[in-house]
Amino acid sequence: MSQENNNNNNKDDDKQIIDATVIDSSNNNESPSEISDNETFDRNELELSSTRRKRDIIRDAIKRIASLSLEDYKWRSEVFKTNEADRELEKSLARMRGEKASYLRPMDATDEDLGPLGKAEKGAVKWLSEVIEEEGKRAKRILDSDGKLIRPMDASKSQHSSSSNQAVTLGQGQGGEAQEDGPLAKIERTVVNFFENIANSETERVVSGKLRPMDLDDSKRGPLGYAEANAVEKLNEIKESELMRAQLMKQRGGDVVRPVDVPGPLGEMERFGLEIVSAEKQRYKDTQAKNGSALIRPKDASIEGPLGKAEKEVIKTLDRLKEEERDRLNSIQKMMVEKRPMDSDRESLLGISEALMVGLLRAPKLFMSVVDRVKELLDSEVLSEEDQKKLIMPSLNETSSTTTTSSK
């Protein structure tokens, strides 16, 4: 028994020694360089995983925004189509009746009645509809690309490339028609091209050793070069006109020659100022001729200057706006008479709102009528006996006549 116990103890000791040996050997086999490599590898893995997480979060956010934008596009396009269909139906019904269709917005007026506000609104609505259409297509492409951010100008490029590929595969010209850029794509492309032209021209200027941007050839000149060339051209014109004016002053023995007497930009500016001064002087004389009883406006002066022309244009525009708004007011009144919301659809939001507003506006009048009636009853007096007899006798005569006719 003692030998067996000793053997078991020896086995346990051997197992412990073997375990310690394995641990020590594993620690001793790894060099410090391998440990540092493992640490850097783990650090790189953590950085890559965090970068991937951030990229996935950004992609998910872009996809959510694109999905919301696509839903907004569907809703807005449906509203535009519904409004356009309703407007066309109203126009057709008005043509059948031989009348002009009533309208609420300035852009819905006829071509004859369309004024500045209508033209401005029509242009703004057209631009906005093109932007909505463009953004809807871009949102769809972002969702199809699994959240990849697509710029407006890149979306138009991809549309062009996809349409050309479709035309090649089909062998027909159905999908190969060139698609125009949207408003946002045009703006972005213009800005990008502007800065690219500046960068390319400046790079070429540095490579060629030119000092000024305008010294480059027309094919390589950028926006800065063209701006400098235009400025230098104007300055050269001023320089030539001033040299000519100095030469004329020298020929005339020192007499002053004004810039307006020689061709050039300064002469044009002085001529414009002289026209304003002469017209204002004549307007002052016309006012004094009438003993200052009424102020003469620039457009009514005997000499029409730049201020008079500008005032005429402003008044013409304001008169056109006034006429346009007057026609629109008449159309709104006609439309409100024809179909009031509280009469046509009282349960709708507009019908409920109009009924509530009309009730609130009529309430004071109804309350005052009730107050007047109560005052009238309070101020009344008891009738005398004679007046009561006068009121009772006709009623008795009527009852007797009815009884006699019934007996007969």
Image: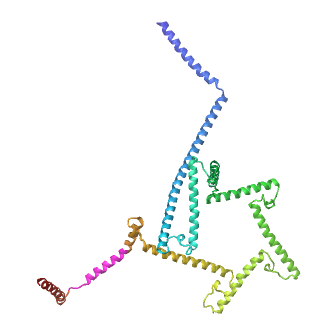
- Quick one: quadrant of the C terminus? bottom left
- Residue 263: percent from the left, percent from the top? 80, 77
Residue at the (64%, 83%) spot, across then down: 299
- Residue 196: percent from the left, percent from the top? 71, 55
- Residue 158: percent from the left, percent from the top? 63, 51
Q: Is residue 234 located in the magenta-colored stretch of the structure?
A: no
Residue 102 visible in the shown view: no
Residue at the (65%, 57%) spot, across then down: 188
Relative depth, front residue between 188 and 202: 188
Q: Residue furthest left?
A: 407
Highlighted range, magenta: 362-382
Q: Is residue 381 located in the magenta-colored stretch of the structure?
A: yes
The image quarter in which residue 124 lies: bottom right
Relative depth, front residue between 82 and 372: 82
- Residue 167: percent from the left, percent from the top? 63, 51
Residue 368 visible in the shown view: yes
Instruction: Please state if 354 lies on the left or on the right of 206 as rendered.
Output: left
Instruction: Please state if 117 lies on the left or on the right of 335 as rendered.
Output: right
